[in-house]
Image: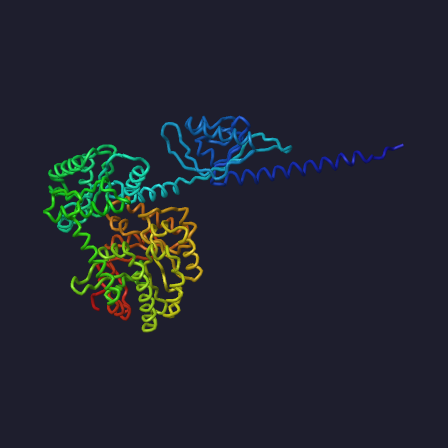
């Protein structure tokens, strides 16, 4: 009798087909996995319980310097990195295997043996489990963040070091001084220290006659000379311009401080070679001693500054220790304060308007309102003389409120008068005091309502330092202003904290590159690199970039090449009185260099 095929044979045939389908599916999934791994521009790797590589992707192989991912299998980090880095990776992975807890977004520096091309990476490592849930190793992914870290380091260094002389700047100097004050409060009988405030004599005439580049060389040379006069534990800083400061720690008496001042005079007596010329310069030095019982570093700095001006007034090239006989200078400062209070009452504070231009077209897109003081007897007082007094006395608040109201009123008047400028923007500077009070959004809302200016046409410029010193209050103020559709620009970017973490958390529309970077783009490649980093950072965060202090066509062209959208500076126009700025708008002219002075033909 013929045998019929039994059901088991059919099942066997069906099972073979099913197995083939599963194998095909697994092959497809493996192909997709390989494709994914080898096209990701991050290093992906799997390791066993002994931290030996079991699989890596093509990017990791390239980073390790092997021709194929297969050549890394069975090897460890000790085969590719320095012992220090490899040992840390091993400890991390063994801890993951022991605890089952991952490491997420850890920044680490991958160091190569022989001083190779070290890189910064952002690494996440997790436990690798089998189907039963047992930990059989680790797997991880590392993203290269070297360029970001370099930009952060550049900005961090810029926050605490002077880019010209490579000396500590004001921020780092004051931090050092604050530490000495804290030490004095903690310990009775703490060592005496002194603060020296130095100003190069006749620097302006040297700068004007030989040019800014020569002036920079002189500052660098003077900085190196000053370093020779100090001990390793002392601090030399450049505050800005031709002003330097020195902190002498652990001195015995006043004579030790004056002795250093005498060494400085002797060191600067020899000529400094600048552009082939022998340039002679002297220095005026003011000295303040901690024995005077100061309450804060700023007071000590102020008195050293006062003593320096006394030394300069006495004939330059000398030093002076601060004493009670210098009270007259304090009285003079009080007179400036009194005059400034009257200036508000009498309407002597007037806004001038500096155009902000589109760097591609030269067209005016906005104005920045800048406060000027028209003194009845002294004439036009520059802001660097009265703004510090206003900040110290609290008058900067009322001045800022008046400037905000007047700038908005003027912008709206121009918009009505010149239909072509119906969307003209106006930028107004906001002080740290205004930001700290928390009432700024209500004040802005009141001014906009009174003037009828569209909130989108108003931009508030806030400095990094003002924002960082008022984080708790400032965060709420910024959010409320952003909700009102008011523009927010971070001013003087790169000179303060330049914290990428905070920058990413605040809804800022634009960064303003500080003039100190732009001014030296022609002569200092490192300045161009910093500007490039700031522009790139802004673009990556979806922000616009505005360059301040544009003075030469070469600077404007370099900024255009970096895709910096807007600029302002003397190349385009000096700050203008309202009447002259109105005539500029009426003319409809674009502002192109070189030296396109907006007052011409007005």
The answer to whether residue 556 of the structure is visible from this angle is no
Question: Quadrant of the image for the C terminus?
Answer: bottom left
- Residue toward you, 38 or 384: 384
Give the farthest residue toward the front.
Answer: 188
Residue plotted at (42% across, 62% down)? 485
Residue plotted at (37% across, 43% down)? 152
Query: Quick check: 202 left or right of 542?
Result: left
Residue plotted at (19% across, 62% down)? 380
Instruction: Indicate the position of residue 353 as horizontal and vertical percent values.
Output: 27, 63
Q: Is residue 54 above or below residue 477?
A: above
Instruction: Indicate the position of residue 349 as horizontal and vertical percent values.
Output: 25, 64
Query: Quick check: 373 left or right of 107?
Result: left
Indicate the quadrant where residue 225 lies. Answer: top left
Instruction: Indicate the position of residue 568 as horizontal and vertical percent values.
Output: 28, 58
Instruction: Indicate the position of residue 566 as horizontal and vertical percent values.
Output: 32, 57
Indicate the quadrant where residue 391 lies. Answer: bottom left
């Amino acid at each position: 009798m013929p045998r019929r095929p039994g059901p088991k044979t059919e099942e066997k045939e069906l099972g073979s087909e099913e197995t083939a389908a599963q194998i095909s599916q697994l092959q497809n999934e493996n192909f997709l996995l390989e494709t994914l791994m080898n096209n990701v521009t991050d290093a992906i790797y799997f390791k066993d319980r002994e931290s030996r590589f079991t699989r890596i992707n093509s990017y990791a192989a390239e980073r390790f310097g092997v021709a194929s991912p297969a050549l890394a299998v069975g090897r460890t980090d000790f085969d590719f990195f320095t012992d220090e880095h490899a040992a840390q990776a091993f400890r991390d992975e063994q801890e993951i295997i022991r605890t089952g807890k991952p490491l997420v977004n850890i920044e680490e520096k991958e160091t190569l043996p022989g001083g190779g091309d070290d890189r910064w990476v952002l690494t996440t490592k997790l436990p690798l489990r089998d189907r039963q849930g047992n930990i059989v190793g680790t797997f991880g992914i590392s993203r290269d963040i070297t360029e970001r870290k370099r930009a952060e380091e550049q900005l961090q260094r810029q926050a605490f070091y002077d880019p010209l002389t490579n000396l500590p700047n004001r921020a780092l100097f004051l931090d050092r001084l604050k530490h000495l004050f804290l030490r004095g409060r903690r310990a009775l009988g703490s060592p005496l220290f002194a603060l020296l405030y130095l100003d190069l004599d006749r620097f302006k005439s040297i700068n004007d006659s030989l040019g800014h580049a020569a002036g920079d060389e002189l500052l660098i040379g003077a900085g190196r000379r000053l370093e020779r006069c100090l001990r390793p534990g002392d601090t030399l800083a450049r505050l800005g311009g031709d002003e330097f400061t020195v902190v002498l720690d652990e001195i015995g008496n006043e004579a030790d401080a004056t002795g250093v001042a005498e060494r400085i005079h002797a060191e600067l007596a020899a000529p400094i070679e600048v552009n082939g010329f022998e340039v002679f310069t002297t220095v005026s030095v003011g000295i303040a001693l901690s024995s005077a019982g100061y309450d804060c570093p700023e007071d000590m700095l102020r008195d050293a500054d006062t003593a320096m001006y006394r030394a300069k007034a006495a004939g330059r090239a000398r030093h002076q220790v601060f004493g009670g006989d210098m009270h007259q200078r304090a009285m003079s400062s009080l007179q400036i304060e009194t005059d400034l209070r009257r200036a508000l009452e009498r309407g002597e504070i007037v806004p001038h308007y500096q155009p902000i231009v589109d760097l591609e077209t030269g067209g005016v897109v906005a104005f920045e309102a800048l406060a000027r003081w028209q003194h009845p007897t002294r004439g036009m007082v520059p802001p660097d003389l009265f703004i510090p007094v206003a900040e110290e006395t609290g008058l900067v608040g009322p001045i800022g409120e008046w400037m905000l109201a007047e700038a908005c009123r003027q912008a709206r008047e121009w918009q009505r008068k010149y239909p072509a400028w119906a969307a003209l923007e106006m930028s107004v500077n906001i002080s740290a005091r205004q930001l700290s009070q928390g009432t700024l959004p209500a004040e802005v809302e009141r001014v906009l309502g009174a003037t009828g200016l569209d909130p989108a046409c108003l931009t508030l410029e806030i400095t990094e330092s003002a924002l960082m010193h008022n984080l708790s209050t400032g965060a709420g103020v910024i959010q409320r202003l952003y909700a009102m559709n008011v523009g927010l620009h971070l001013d003087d970017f790169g000179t303060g904290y330049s914290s990428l973490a905070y920058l990413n958390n605040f809804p800022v529309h634009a960064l303003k590159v500080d003039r100190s970077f732009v001014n030296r783009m022609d002569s200092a490649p490192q300045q161009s690199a910093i500007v490039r980093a700031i522009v790139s950072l802004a673009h990556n965060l979806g922000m616009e970039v505005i360059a301040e202090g544009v003075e030469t066509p070469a600077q404007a062209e370099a900024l255009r090449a970096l895709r910096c959208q807007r600029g302002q500076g003397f190349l385009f126009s000096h700050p203008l009185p309202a009447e002259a700025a109105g005539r500029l708008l009426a003319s409809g002219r674009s502002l192109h260099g070189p030296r396109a002075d907006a007052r011409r033909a007005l």
